[in-house]
Amino acid sequence: MLPPPRFEIDNIELRGLEGELAALVKQRMQTGLPVGSLDGERSVRLPHPHKTDHLIKIKGSGFKGGPVWFGTLHRSGLRAPLFDYDGRMMVDVASGHDAAYLGGASFQQASTEFRLARRLAELGYPVVPCLGYGRVQHKSLSSWFSVHEMRTEWGSVAPPRVPLQGYVAAKLELGRLLLELGTRHQLIGYAWFVAAPAGPLVLKDLHPFRMADPLSMSRTSWVMQMFFGLHIAALASVHFARKAGIAESTYGDIRVAVFKTVSPGATVADHVALSGELVRPYMLGVPKHFDAAALRRVLEGNPITRGLLDACPAEYERW
């Protein structure tokens, strides 16, 4: 049994936030007011203090509109893997959802949202602005949050809000964009979009990203990291299609859309094969017995991962 929710904040720290916006965020995190509207289980949307056509979203504001439940960790089971020079999986505990308290975000998640949103804006990508981030403290415990500025007309690019054709097109664009970020800017991860009706796609949810590094990553580890992000995006495609009641006969096109940039002929069978030959033995946990040569054979033997091997920038060392 979880304890009853209470707002018990001993201290709050804000980074990048000033004036009325800082006062609004501080009040909401300390008292739960204004209540605002829920956006998922750990975020709220509040009226913008200056702009009537915008709103403020606090990600990590508390559990289901209440406070952060200090001492009770998320139990999502979602891991944040990273891969060493040979392609062996390690677990980045700080980046995983379960490093945060229920209703809150981790230090890594909040700070990455802030820094990457600014970096992508500098590079010219449409991105939901992250205005700042911070933490609340209760006794010796800390929970983090990030603060985003949203247009009121933005909504998630997912069915039933968007038609199936638009959803598949967005997945195609995500695959293209993730490959571009990984090859041109050494940024590897996954994200999703919001958009206004008939408006451009705008990136959101950036915390799964990390910087690729040719000094500590090889071609093999680059491909493993890239494929993991695309794999998660593919699984999310089917999850939200099923949730919206879309006919299962269309799941194939939805599932493989994110792979089409790197492997134009990619099929559901290719992804299913990698789920069994790559994901289960190499990505769900730290392997007890690791064979780098066997891993390379898997990567070279599937058109999706072979396409990633071909796309990998030359500065990453080949075996």
Image (spheres, rainbow, N blue to C red):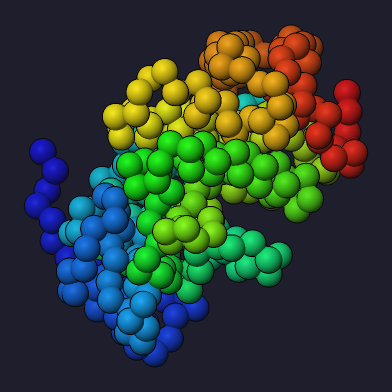
Residue 284 screen position, x and y as percent: 51, 22
Q: Is residue 316 left or right of residue 279?
A: right
Q: Nearer the viewer, residue 270 or 140?
A: 270
Is residue 108 visible in this depiction of the protein?
A: no
State whether residue 250 appears in this view: yes
The single residue placed furthest to the bottom in the displayed view is 19
| Residue at figure coordinates x 59%, y 43% from the top left | 174
In this rendering, is residue 226 above or below 267?
below
Residue drawn 70% across the image and 49% down it: 181
Tell me the quarter of the picture where residue 289 sits.
top right
Question: 170 or 218, which lies in front?
Answer: 170
Closest to the observer: 258 or 14?
A: 258
Measured along the vertical axis of the image, is residue 146 above or below residue 16?
A: above
- How many callouts does the rendering have? 0
Quadrant of the image containing the C terminus: top right
Q: Quarter of the image for the N terminus: give it.
A: top left
- Which residue does the image show at 49% across and 78% down from the upper left? 16
Picture layout, residue 70 above or below residue 173? below
Position in image of residue 112 (x %, y %): 55, 58
Residue 70 sits above or below residue 183 on the image: below
Q: Residue 34 versus residue 218: which sits nearer the camera?
A: 34
**Coordinates of residue 210 in the picture (x, y in percent):** 63, 48
Q: Position of residue 81 (x, y in %)?
A: 57, 34
Residue ID at (51%, 69%): 129
Q: Is residue 223 left or right of residue 154?
A: right
Q: Is residue 314 left or right of residue 53?
A: right
